[in-house]
Amino acid sequence: QVQLVESGGGLVQPGGSLRLSCAASGSIFSINAMGWYRQAPGKERELVASITSRDRTNYADSVKGRFTISRDNAKNTVYLQMNSLKPEDTAVYYCNAVNSMGDDYWGRGSQVTVSS
């Protein structure tokens, strides 16, 4: 089992920045990749960014150039640095981990609201 705890969400004005953190615990040795998803009201959950155990990253087109995913292996933590935030980035952001068996683990979510 893997446990994921997100932090760092909140309210920010358009053009502002936030950094989300996701701390992993449990069977972390089995994790192949971690990522961030988001779900806005009335919309499906979508991938925002992901990072593999070999630090290969992938981004949704809508956030390329604005968001950066990174990891600190010593702290078992993955970060999502979000810059130049737009109102359409408003959503609940979920941390995700996938292990070597293909099992998905999810955090409880962190609300990000971009509004003036």
Image (tube, rainbow, N blue to C red):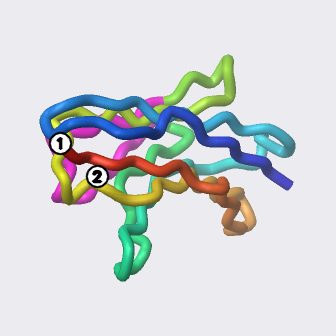
The quadrant in which residue 88 appears is bottom left
69 magenta-colored: yes
Determine which residue is flagged by label 1.
116
In the displayed structure image, the side of residue 3 where residue 10 appears, left or right: left
At x 69%, y 48%, the residue is 31
Residue placed most toward the observer, 29 or 80: 80
Specify the quadrant that holds the N terminus: bottom right
SS at mark 1 in the image: loop
Residue type beneath disc 1? Ser
Q: What's the CA distance linking mark 2 and mark 1?
A: 26 Å
The part of the chain drawn in magenta is 55-70
Say if 74 sits above or below 62 in the image.
above
Q: Point out the tag, 2 or 1, that comes first from the N-terminus.
A: 2
Residue in the image at 16% along x and 48% along y: 86
* Percent x, y of residue 95: 56, 51
Residue 115 x %, y %: 22, 47
Q: In the rendered structure, find residue 59 and report the number of the disc placed on it.
A: 2
Residue 12 is left or right of residue 74, and the answer is left
Q: Does residue 29 belong to the magenta stretch? A: no
